[in-house]
Amino acid sequence: MLVIPAIDLSEGQVVRLRRGEMAEKTIYSTDPAAVAREWARAGAEIIHVVDLDGAVSGVPRNREALRSIADAAGVPIEFGGGLRTLDAMAAAFDAGAHWVVLGTVALTDPELLGASVSRYADRVIVALDARDGRIAVEGWTRTSDVDAVDLAREMQSLGVQRLLCTDIATDGMLSGPNIAGLRRIAEAVDIGVIASGGVSCVEDIVALRPLEALGIMGVITGRALYEGRLDLREAIAAARG
């Protein structure tokens, strides 16, 4: 199981939110490239980058920061936030992303999702951001009536090969991952699942390891790293068993 450090961007800065609320924003660095180099030196094999401004506005706002991260890190980048057209996805790949993460369009524009999977295949990751088991969209500002498990099954049927599952209630809260919710999704599909939300310590990484047999291939962590509660090298070692 991979441990994937997160770099969340807002106005070119590295930030973290609580439960996805922009009003609950903490700035951790004004140099995203330096942060990326730090995570790569600590052994990160993938870095997760989110354009928070793009997620809310629907148009990517931090593409140059993405480029600087990709150039500095030297490891594959998965990037999401505001990618709601094929042109926006192409621009993200041009800026250094290896995977694009699609959220809102997976629910609102199945035609675009199909076109993106047809064009980019396994380089498309679909984010299932759930609040109480229901999918949230538009930068988590609106919660739909769509069940996360139902959408996971639908994504698999459309050819999506990797899902990113975030439990909004635990995101940035350091309260531990939603093991039951992750198990529910992982058991419903036969494709790779990346977990996100709530990781606070090495014990949380260890708690996720039994789900690897169900398809949980990685876990994203952010705030715990930035606040020194979790050491990335130690977390990577724990994930490998």
Image: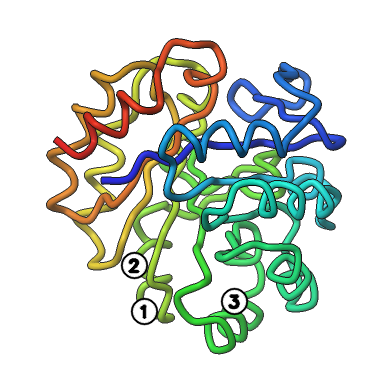
Q: Of callouts 2 and 3, which one flags the residue occurring earlier in the amino acid sequence?
A: 3
Residue 177 pos. (x, y %): 34, 28
Q: Secondary structure at mark 2?
A: helix
Q: Residue at 66% across / 73% down in the picture?
A: 109
Q: Secondary structure at mark 1?
A: helix
Badge 1 amino acid: Ser
Badge 3 amino acid: Leu
Residue 57 pos. (x, y %): 84, 49
Numbered label attached to residue 157: 1
Task: Please state which of residues 215 and 75 is positioned toward the viewer in this rendering.
Answer: 75
Horizontally, residue 220 falls left or right of residue 186, namely right
**Relative height, residue 163 to residue 195 (above, below):** below
Mark-to-mark CA distance, 1 and 3: 12 Å
Give neighbour class at mark 3: few <14, some 14-19, many 20+ (Cα, 10 Å): many
Q: Residue at 59% across / 76% down in the picture?
A: 113
Q: Of callouts 1 and 3, which one flags the residue occurring earlier in the amino acid sequence?
A: 3
Residue 28 pos. (x, y %): 70, 19
**Relative height, residue 126 to residue 143 (above, below):** below
Q: Are marks 2 and 1 in contact (CB under 8 Å)?
A: yes
Mark-to-mark CA distance, 2 and 3: 14 Å
**Residue bearing mark 3:** 113
Q: Residue at 23% across / 59% down in the picture?
A: 188
Task: Identify the image quadrant of residue 30.
Answer: top right
Mark-to-mark CA distance, 2 and 1: 6 Å
Residue 41 pos. (x, y %): 49, 36
Q: Residue at 68% across / 63% down in the picture?
A: 96
Task: Identify the image quadrant of residue 44.
Answer: top left
Give neighbour class at mark 2: few <14, some 14-19, many 20+ (Cα, 10 Å): some
**Residue bearing mark 2:** 153
